[in-house]
Amino acid sequence: MRFCWPGAMAETLNIERFELAEGERVFLRGASGSGKSTLLSLIGGVLQPSAGRISVGGQALDVLGAAARDCFRADHIGFVFQLFNLLPWLSARDNILLACRFSPARRARLSQMGVLPQAEAERLAARLGLTPALLERPAAALSVGQQQRVAAARALIGAPGLIVADEPTSALDAELQARFVDLLMDECAAAGAALLFVSHDARLAEHFDRVVELADINQATVREVA
Amino acid sequence: MNTIAYLGWRSVLNRRGSVLLTVLSIALSVAMLIGVERLRNDARDGFARTVSGTDLIVGARGGQVQLLLYSVFHIGNASNNLSWQSVQHIAALPQVDWVVPLSLGDTHLGYRVVGTTAEYFARFRHGDDRALVFAAGRAFAPAPEGIFETVIGAELAVRHGYQVGAKIVLSHGSGGFADHGDKPFTVVGILAPSGTPVDRSVLVSLEGIEAIHVDWQGGAPIPGVSIGAEHVRKFDLTPKTVTAAMVGLKNRVTVFRVQRQINTFADEPLTAILPGATLQELWSLVGVAERALLAVAAVVVVVGLAGLVAVMIAGLGERRRELAILRALGAGPRHVLGLLMLESVTLAVVGILCGLLLVHGLIWMSGGWLTTTYGIYLGIGWPSLSEWGLLGAVLAASVLASLVPAYRAYRYAVADGMTIRM
């Protein structure tokens, strides 16, 4: 798979092959500016590769149109970012439920499991250590650690096959970092979701099934300059 | 779509301060636009409704529009009167069916006093050939019994609580300088509302007008002379002059011939007008001003919408991360476009509705004042066809305006993707 930003002189990414097994937990290490965000946008279907192909859960993304890729992302991938994961003017609960609002498939999976989105949001929140009182607060009133847990609950609700976490711990202190990674791993395991954890911080790598260096798999000659 | 509406609503709630101001500015501009339009149409309607059934109006030689304004609408004053002989001469013309003379000049509490004959109540027509109706009482009796009897318009009766039997005192001229306090009039009839200046009139007999002025000369009481109401009947109360006369013809076909005859009357310089035609002349005069006013109102609406665009675009900078989050959750650029358009258009629609409420509120509050001061009746009710047209144009303009922030957000959504940029 190759990707070149329009107008750029050289490719940002040139990855021969990179795979996650179902339910696998992979730590992808890369320095900032190494093309991490670009790779995640490609996996999310927001960008299209210049050459090659990306499949998520057996679905080739390149055969889908832009709207279908948006839909697919909503249904099958949960994202957790470094910061600003939440809409500040919605309550924590509504932020979690937002994932279901955009995805009929997530709602359908929940109703197959026989749970209401509301109940599932509360269950996930409780498992992540968020009290019901916190759920009613606007997201802007939560601490960073609480916000990250709300973001994790939103990524997980409706059991998407893949969770992509982009530096989700870098705003947390060391102790919270480890706790958050553990929580995320537990919940992914419980939901049977694969986890792609992207970070520049190698200290967290020990928790994972597999560690991949982006620099090792990316054969693009010129690096993006951050 | 539901999700978009929900997000738009919550996002707007979050920015309610600036949003309220935007809605307010749109509401004010729409209120102005609709207000101008309604004022213009209702004023025309009111004027057109007032002149009906009268074929010619005759006054002293002067401007046609001026004659129409002071004789029918009680706006302004006559610069000259016509003699009673001329009125009788016109009444004697073979084509003329009836003549109702009008004698203006006095007031009661700012309401115009109209000296006329009892035939006025039978001949005056408004709207679709509707006659005046008495809500209470009767017309004043012919002289000499009815000299100090008066019939008042509905509005005067309501405003001042006058009932049949009430005594009122007329003031000389437009009031405030001298009263005819020695000769009060008795209300014998109250007219039902007609939506014309008659509602604000005090109608008395021509002899009554003469009677209160017997001891006056040159617009002031003659010093040392006071003739009581009980003695006034001994005088000859036939008017020497009147202000104007309404003329009805036996056959309308002859209207231009009679008009020419009156205009070329040898004994006195007179002007005869066809009320409808003169009204058209009036509209062509004020039409320019009306269009200018409407254009200014339209520009104000454009300013209001520009404010909306500015607020939406200013908000976009902060909302870029909001958009990136929505993108990560599966929103496409078209959702972002829809969200922004929906927000802008909704604000515009709310602004338009508030504007309509505002204009009706203003009409409700100031209607009475406008009517007494300017003789304009503003109706409260559903927008007229032309107002719907204006509202539609504002809505269309707001949809166009909403494209500006929406397209910008769309570009952000495509360029940023899920990447959160500050």
Image (tube, coloured by chain):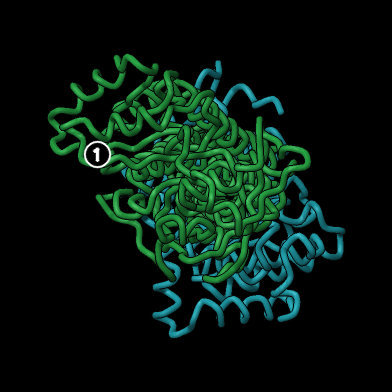
Residue identifier under label 1 = B248
Colour in which chain A is shown?
cyan
- In the rendered structure, the answer to whether residue A21 lies left or right of residue B321 reads left
Specify the quadrant that holds the N terminus of chain B: bottom left
Crowd tier of the residue under label 1, counting other residues whose Cα lies within 10 Å: few below 14, some 14–19, many 20 or above: many
What residue lies at 58% left-to-right and 52% top-to-bottom?
Answer: B232
Residue B29, by quadrant, is top right
Q: Nearer the viewer, residue A174 or A157?
A: A157
Decide: is A41 above or below A152.
above
Q: Position of residue A194 (x, y in %)?
A: 54, 62
Q: Nearer the viewer, residue B328 or B56?
A: B56
Spot the residue most to the bottom. Answer: A114
Chain at tag 1: B
- In the rendered structure, the answer to whether residue B225 lies left or right of residue A17 reads right
* Res B251 seen here: yes
User: What type is the residue that disc 1 sits on?
Assistant: Gly
Q: Position of residue B250 (x, y in %)?
A: 15, 39
The chain coloured green is: B
Q: Position of residue B152 (x, y in %)?
A: 50, 58
